[in-house]
Amino acid sequence: MTDASTFGRPWERVDIEERLIAALQGQLRESVSVEDYSEAARLRDALNECMKGIEVAKFMIEYMKAIEEVRYADAAKLRDVGVGLVGWWCAHETADGTRIPGGHILQVIPAHGRFLGISYTARQLVNNAPGTPEVSTVGRYSL
């Protein structure tokens, strides 16, 4: 039996790793912009090392590789476990048929350790405002 304190631990680790990756990406962009390529290479390697254990990154890399190598059956399997959700989605009604005034726009992105769904209103898109995180899912599948 697990208690509530152990349930949150993996997500705390994911949040810390996500902040580390964001910091490394920012430093990498800065190093490239000032043309410090030796530092950029070091940061790229550190970033790649951080991303090695991330399930979502593994899914995305394997999916792209399967398509590139014309292994469509493998790509379809990966698509079905979540990779195929990545992109922009629009709905005008809910699953039970209720109309959604103005529609509903959802962007699914591969985030650190999970796929993240972010909803947008038309006003948020027009004003280039951030969306609202709605759905977060982690794949527990083996490649």
Image (cartoon, grey):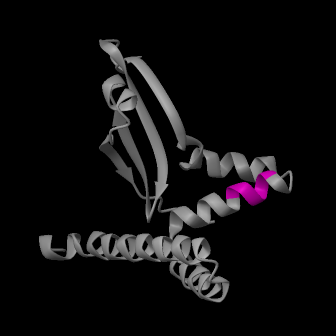
Which residue occupies the foreground of this view, 127 or 130? 127
Which residue occupies the foreground of this view, 72 or 114? 114
Which quarter of the picture shows residue 61? bottom right
Q: Position of residue 98 (x, y in %)?
A: 30, 12
Magenta stretch mostly in which secondary structure?
helix
In the figure, 59 relative to 2: above or below? above
For residue 142, say whether it is visible: no
For residue 15: magenta? no
Which quarter of the picture shows residue 4? bottom left
Looking at this view, name the residue that lies furthest to the left: 4
- Total label count? 0
Q: Position of residue 140 (x, y in %)?
A: 47, 62
Q: Position of residue 136 (x, y in %)?
A: 36, 51
Which residue occupies the foreground of this view, 46 or 142? 46
In the figure, 96 relative to 75: above or below? above
> Which residue range is magenta in the image?
63-67
The residue lying at 34 percent from left, 14 percent from top is 102
The residue lying at 60 percent from left, 66 percent from top is 58
